[in-house]
Amino acid sequence: MNNVRLIVSNLRKAFNRRLVFDGVSFTLEKPASIVITGRNGSGKSTLIKILAGVLSTSGGNFFYEVGESKLDSENIYKIIGLVSPYLILYDEFTAFENLHLFSKIRGIKKSNEEIFDLLDQVGLYERRNDLLRTFSSGMKQRMKYASALIHNPTVLLLDEPTSNLDDEGKKFVNKLIQDFKSNKILVVATNEQSDFQFGDSIINLDAYKINSKR
């Protein structure tokens, strides 16, 4: 893919009269990565949702550029992958069926072998025909990574990336993230200090409130 940029300019979000953050600005050009941190309620998940195009802003703007062209907001989903606690998986389907469904929803064609390869990449090939309701929380977290990567995104948005993972799972995520950020764009929302290593830079949303100094 052509060069990709994420440009965030004076982003503001409020719910009714409650300010979440104001004046958030940064630019990422692949390869690049950033960590978004802050206290609980500071707006980390909110910012990820905005960048994923599933939540509106209250002010400022953001956009993705592909080459020299600005990507239309309705096409953001084509270049981003999202891993978050609020991402929906289908417990009544198998791991294979979930990924097959996600590929159809995205309008992409994936062979059985390609889906098997992706499940192998996240360490779930042996459980490919098992219903997700039999999976542990850590295994479901791995499934979220598989669903986020199925269309080979250029931008990966991660909200609490190591949530519900044991040490082995964290090693898997660490390798996956390091490989991804080497030539693409990564945005990580986390309070875990061990996750700070994933970002070339860090933004603390606690500093982006009215009358706060940055």
Image: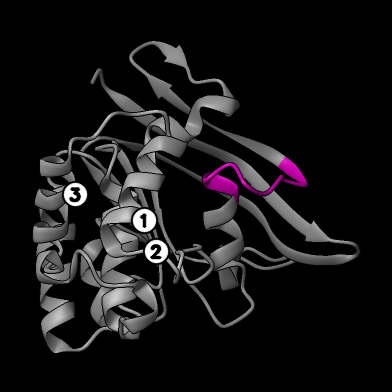
Other-residue count near label 3 (Cα within 10 Å), few / some / many at <14 / 14–19 / ≥20: many
Q: Nearer the viewer, mark 3 or mark 2?
A: 2
Q: How is this picture coloured?
A: one colour
Question: Can residue 210 be seen at all in this image of the molecule?
Answer: no
What's the residue type where badge 1 is placed?
Asn
| Upstream in sequence: badge 1 or badge 2 | 2
Measure the alpha-carbon separation of dots 1 and 2: 6 Å
The residue where tag 1 is placed is: 98
Mark 3 vs mark 2: which is more N-terminal? Answer: 2
What x and y, as percent, mark residue 99? 32, 51
Q: Amino acid at mark 2?
A: Phe
Q: Position of residue 127 (x, y in %)?
A: 17, 71
Residue at 27% from the left image edge and 44% from the top image edge: 150
> Element type at marker 1?
helix
Q: Position of residue 207 (x, y in %)?
A: 58, 68
Furthest-bottom residue in this view: 166
Between 106 and 71, the one lying in front of the other is 106
Magenta stretch encompasses residue 52: yes
In this view, 39 is above or below 60: below
Region rendered in magenta: 50-59
The amino acid marked with disc number 3 is Lys
According to the picture, the residue beneath numbered tag 3 turns out to be: 181
The residue singled out by tag 2 in the image is 93
